[in-house]
Amino acid sequence: MASALFNSTMASVPGLPPTAAFQTVFEEVSKYNVQLNLFERLWASWYLWMQNDTIATGIMSFVMHELVYFGRSLPWIIIDAIPYFNKWKIQNTKLPTWKEQWDCAFLVFISHCTVELPQIWLFHPLATYFGMEYGLPFPPWWKMAYQIAAFFVMEDAWHYWFHRALHYGPLYKSIHKLHHTYSAPFGLAAEYASPIEVMLLGFGVVGCPIVWVSVTGDLHLVTMYLWIVLRLFQAIDAHSGYDFPWSLRRILPFWAGADHHDLHHERFIGNYASSFRWWDYFLDTEAGDAAAKKRREKKLAQIRAKKAQ
């Protein structure tokens, strides 16, 4: 129950009626736990008010996911409607129509409600079974930072291999083809995919932290939330179709930004990783003219070396 939220760093709230309004719960929590910051007090009040951990986390997770996904997609919808930004559009002759944007948003929302919602609902009992914490205080920023960095690396590996597998003929036709409806992607299309693909690739996002906590015994729900937010930002931005002079990949050369994934949609092959470029680089699955030229030169060099023997 939600009362388990309180540990040695936080005194329980005495005499709080079970039917109290959220505002009342928040005021009582604030009165007896002045050492907590505003966000921690809101967090504690939410769990106390709901009186059910699974429901509290489920509602909060779903609402957060929808707000972040569509909220982060909104700026790209606006940018697509402003001609000034067209000079940074990678495939600038292929702008999504309003109908395409609407149809995509509708299908994605239906997918969120039917495919992702059950997974979101089951996450809390599964993750807490393996040792995830959701109480107070929150972990320090440095711990959240290195754990999220580890999740990016782990998920990128998962995404590379399963995304690459989905481009195998029968799997592509039956599962992955839907995601390639748009050869010039846009932000909303990040989760435009079949239910099987949503579950398969989504497991990398949720499953990697669960594997982490099952091995280390160290993970907090708020770290998980920050990871989900950053991963959603990465996925939506990678599908945006825009490559700006200030894009992250120009600061971190190993970051797989929109230019990396846009090329995958344009060529329908190569550039399978989600966040980083190293898998495609070392396994020779980079897409584009430059990579193709490099492979041709390598092959010609091998042929010349063989003839010289």
Image (tube, rainbow, N blue to C red):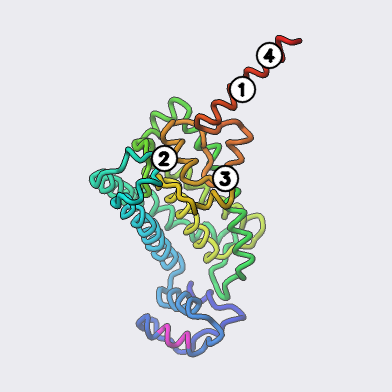
What's the mark number on residue 65?
none
Residue at mark 2: 196
Real-space Cα distance between discs 2 and 3? 24 Å
The numbered mark, 1 or 2, whose residue comes first in the sequence reads 2
The numbered mark, 4 or 3, whose residue comes first in the sequence reads 3
Left or right position of 104 against 198: left
Residue 267 x, y percent position in the rendering: 44, 31
Magenta residues span: 25-30
Residue 135 x, y percent position in the rendering: 55, 72
Count of marks placed on residues:
4
The numbered mark, 2 or 3, whose residue comes first in the sequence reads 2
What's the mark number on residue 304?
4
- Pick the residue in front: 16 or 255: 255
Front label number (1 vs 3): 1
Front label number (4 vs 3): 4
Residue 190 visible in the displayed image: no
Residue at mark 1: 297
Q: Amino acid at mark 4?
A: Arg
Left or right position of 139 against 267: right
- Pick the residue in front: 284 or 90: 90
State if disc 3 and disc 1 touch (CB < 8 Å). Answer: no
Left or right position of 276 against 245: right
Left or right position of 81 against 172: left
**Mark 4: secondary structure:** helix
Quarter of image, res 209: bottom right
Q: Amino acid at mark 2?
A: Ile
